[in-house]
Image (spheres, rainbow, N blue to C red):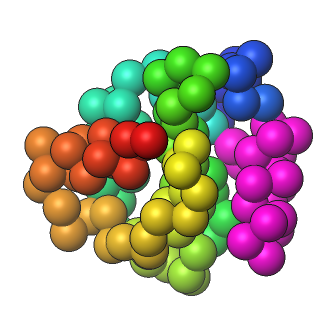
């Protein structure tokens, strides 16, 4: 998906954040979502994402969440936020509102 990057969290910065967790990242596989609800709906929609897909929501310059699909043919997501490493979750096992609440919680500083 070709989505405009956020000036507050560029694709280069996403690559750097993931590299700090020993995770490779192809910048062409980073997608941005303007609303956290849209990101949550997208990641939970499939139980089998291609390994390496990256989903990003930026609330403002100081609050963001990055989710990277880390296991082959699954919905296992490494979750990073403005506070650092957060968790590894099976995003498709959450209800939409529950996932939105969890992601908002990860962005709290």
Q: Is residue 22 visible?
A: yes
44 horizontally vs 101: left or right: right
At a point 82% along the width and 51% down the height, the residue shown is: 15
Instruction: Return the x and y of residue 94 as percentages of the image width and height.
Output: 18, 61
Which residue occupies the foreground of this view, 20 or 14?
20
Q: Residue 82, located in which quarter of the rendered image?
A: top right
At a point 78% along the width and 30% down the height, the residue shown is: 10
Instruction: Return the x and y of residue 55 as percentages of the image width and height.
Output: 55, 45
At a point 44% along the width and 74% down the height, the residue shown is: 88
Which residue occupies the foreground of this view, 28 or 5?
5
| Magenta residues, start to end | 11-30
70 horizontally vs 86: left or right: right
Q: Residue 3, located in which quarter of the rendered image?
A: top right
Instruction: Return the x and y of residue 101 as percentages of the image width and height.
Output: 20, 44
Q: Where is 65 relative to 26, above or below?
A: above
Instruction: Return the x and y of residue 62 as percentages of the image width and height.
Output: 58, 27
- From the image, which quarter does the N terminus lie in? top right
19 part of magenta stretch = yes
75 horizontally vs 102: left or right: right
At a point 53% along the width and 36% down the height, the residue shown is: 64
Q: Where is 38 relative to 47, above or below?
A: above
Which residue occupies the foreground of this view, 17 or 39?
17
Q: Residue 87, located in which quarter of the rendered image?
A: bottom left
Q: Where is 34 relative to 42, above or below?
A: above
Q: Main secondary structure of the magenta part?
A: helix
- From the image, which quarter does the C terminus lie in? top left
75 part of magenta stretch = no
């Amino acid at each position: 998906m070709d989505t405009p990057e956020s000036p507050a969290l560029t694709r280069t910065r996403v690559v750097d954040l993931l590299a700090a967790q020993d995770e490779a990242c192809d910048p062409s596989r980073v997608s941005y979502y303007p609303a956290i609800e849209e990101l949550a709906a997208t990641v939970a929609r499939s139980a089998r994402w291609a390994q390496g897909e990256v989903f990003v929501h930026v609330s403002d310059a100081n609050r963001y969440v990055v989710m990277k699909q880390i296991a082959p043919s699954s919905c296992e997501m490494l979750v990073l936020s403005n506070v650092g490493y957060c968790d590894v979750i099976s995003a498709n096992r959450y209800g939409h509102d529950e996932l939105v609440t969890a992601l908002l919680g990860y962005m709290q500083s």
